[in-house]
Image: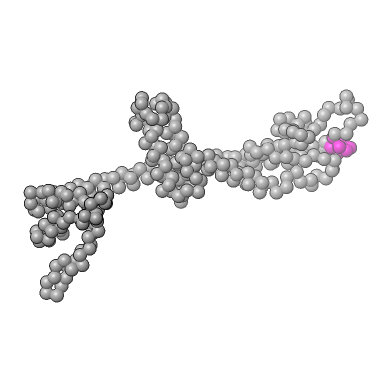
Amino acid sequence: SDVQFLIPETLDVLASSRPPKADKKSTATSCDIHAPDLLCYGGVSLGFSFTLQKSHVVALGSAESTKIGLRLFCKSRDQEERMQKIEEEAEKKREEEDRKRRAARRAKENATWEKRKEQMRKDKEDYERMKQEWAKDRREFGGSMFDYEDDNEEECQCPRCRFGDRFSSSGGSFFFNIGGIPFRVRFDNCDSDEDSFFDEFDERWEEQLAEEKEEENRKQANVLGVEPEDDPRTIKLAYRKMALKFHPDKWKRDSQHGMSRKAAEDRFKAVQAAYDHMMSNFDD
């Protein structure tokens, strides 16, 4: 609003100014105005510096008078500022909704991980109990449970036959499922109850989970067409581009992606899930 105090002659000069011939082919839509000593009075100088939009200059120059042009300019500027404010508020609302959705998703994922860890602890306890039972039976048998004088008279006492499908076997090795991850265990002729069937089990389990998370991160990044290490801005731009392409409200029979409405909706949900997953890496 301070611009209305500039003298009309100065505005007429700005409005009637034309770029030099060398700039006629320029596609610039704005230019920076810098006038440090626009007005001087009593030893005091008034200057300003701002960016002048080409559309404003054209509107001002085509107006019936500077006063009318200035009024239209201020009206247009105020409207643009209102629209910008509305858009900024809408963007903040969308971001807040996105954060809440990601927080709920992250809470669900954390609950799943905690449940899996609890299952891992229970599986370890079960394994220790089975190991003790197997060691006890082995001592009572008087040696290795795999060495029998008459295989026809004795029932197989390998871990799988002894404890059921909690154990699996492959290539002569036995595996026990702990926390959803099969770990190779050793059954030999050693009679010590102190035998360690897991070397650095906890570290291996955490490493396995970390690898699964990295793989999931790569998978979700691939859905958006970005790299796992890309910044939030890149991820957001990719998401918006794909959201506009597959959003159900944007679907048409002749859409370029050629998908049915249901297929496009499913793709949009996958894109949104991938976006939430990637952006959750940057949430506090």
Residue in the image at 11% along x and 74% along y: 42
User: Residue 30 location in percent, x, y?
Assistant: 24, 53
Q: Is residue 87 above or below residue 165?
A: below
Q: Image check: 205 left or right of 246?
A: right
Q: Residue at x 79, y 47 (%)?
A: 194
Residue 215 found in image quarter: top right
Camera-nearest residue between 129 and 10: 10
Q: Quadrant of residue 23?
A: bottom left
Q: Quadrant of residue 242?
A: top left
Q: Position of residue 212 (x, y in %)?
A: 59, 42
Which residue is at a point 22% across and 63% down the rendered structure image? 34
Is residue 177 shown left or right of residue 41?
Answer: right
Residue 237 belongs to magenta span: no
Whether 57 is drawn above or below 240: the answer is below
Q: Identify the residue at the far right of this view.
A: 149
Looking at the picture, tell me which residue is in the foreground, 213 or 148. Answer: 213
Q: Would residue 123 be seen by someone viewing this image from the given angle?
A: no
Residue 209, percent from left and from top:
60, 43
Which span is picked out in magenta?
138-145
Looking at the image, residue 279 lies above or below residue 144: below
* Residue at x 11% of width, y 72% of height: 41
Q: Please tell me how many numbered marks the rendered image carries.
A: 0
Q: Quadrant of the N terminus?
A: bottom left
**Quick check: can you spot residue 167?**
yes
Residue 154 x %, y %: 86, 27
Name the outermost residue toward the bottom: 43
Question: What colour scheme governs how the chains and residues are painted in the rendered image of this protein?
Answer: one colour
